[in-house]
Amino acid sequence: MKDSIVVLPKMRLLGHFSVLITMTFWSVTFISTKLLLPAFTPTQILVVRSTFGLVTLWLINPKRVKYACIADRLLVAGAGFSGIFLYYYLENTALLFTTASNVGVIVATVPFFSMLASHFFLKEDALKKSYFIGFVISMIGISMLTFGDSASMQINPFGDFLALLAIMVWGFYTVFTRLIARRGYPNLPVTRDMFLYGLIAQVVVLLIEHDPIDLHLLVSSPYVYHFLFLGLVASAFCFVSWNFGLRTIGVIKSSFYLYASPVITITFANLVLGESFTMMDSIGTAFTISGLLISEFKRR
């Protein structure tokens, strides 16, 4: 079974670094997306972002991947639909209704759903008592973020629910990418193909919405800089580095780095967007991260 590309310590160290730098960039994407939403729809942002990412990956490696069977190609298509399209569509839409800080904290709970998906579909990890205790504590923390501030009751619940739904979808993406890695296909061109399938789904939704992209607005400042960051860095580079991390250090160790993401997102949301962070938000965040850490107890 080809579950990891290599086991050499240097490659594992590179895998840890790849996941760390990916998580840092992804933590800031909530800020860029939030700044784009007043001028663009969630689907428009996705289409532009994925197009930039796909073109970049194709320029780096235009070589076609020869899949051994149709089932392998369907795995890649499933990864593209779940991770490139549906996850980001739900996340972008969530940002219309709730704060970037809330989404950042909720997305950090993705290890729970990665573990759950890995347990049932990959048979990779046993779910111990600590997992369930940590899950309950984290869900209490998310509830505090969502309902703790009565002033935000009218805008937060639906957005927070969409963010939670998004990370459930990411669990399936993780399964797809692990199964693809076991087939031994090269990381970069396979990631490029994922972007292609994800972009196809995004374009279909854009056509259904009948809302064409304003190209003049797209290339204007500061929007173009956010799109370049989202497309070239957060998409093309980060998906390659994240998938490399999954192959070299595994699902669980990669997900561990998500614990730092709320702190990064909250900091930038406060500095750039001016989002307030109340005492209840702090307690909710502490509960969420504590639950994640408890779920990892004696797992490593």
Image (spheres, rainbow, N blue to C red):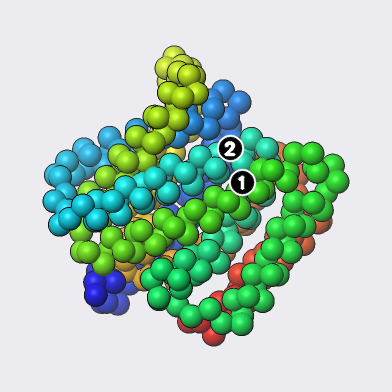
In the picture, the quarter occupied by the N terminus is bottom left
Residue under label 1, please give it: 162
Label 2: element kind: helix
Q: Where does residue 108 sit, x and y in percent of width and height?
A: 57, 59
Q: Is residue 6 above or below residue 80?
A: below
Residue at point 48% right, 31% down? 43
Amino acid found under the numbered disc labelled 1: Leu
Amino acid found under the numbered disc labelled 2: Thr
Residue under label 2, please give it: 93
Tell me, for residue 277, which label it has, or none. Answer: none
Front residue of 83 and 21: 83
Label 1: element kind: helix
Q: Residues within 10 Å of mark 1 (few under 14, many from 20)?
A: many
Labels 1 and 2 touching (C-beta < 8 A): yes
Q: Is residue 22 left or right of residue 286?
A: left
Can you tell which quarter of the image residue 90 is in? top right
Mark 2 or mark 1, which is nearer the start of the sequence?
2
Q: Where does residue 36 sit, x and y in percent of width and height?
A: 55, 30
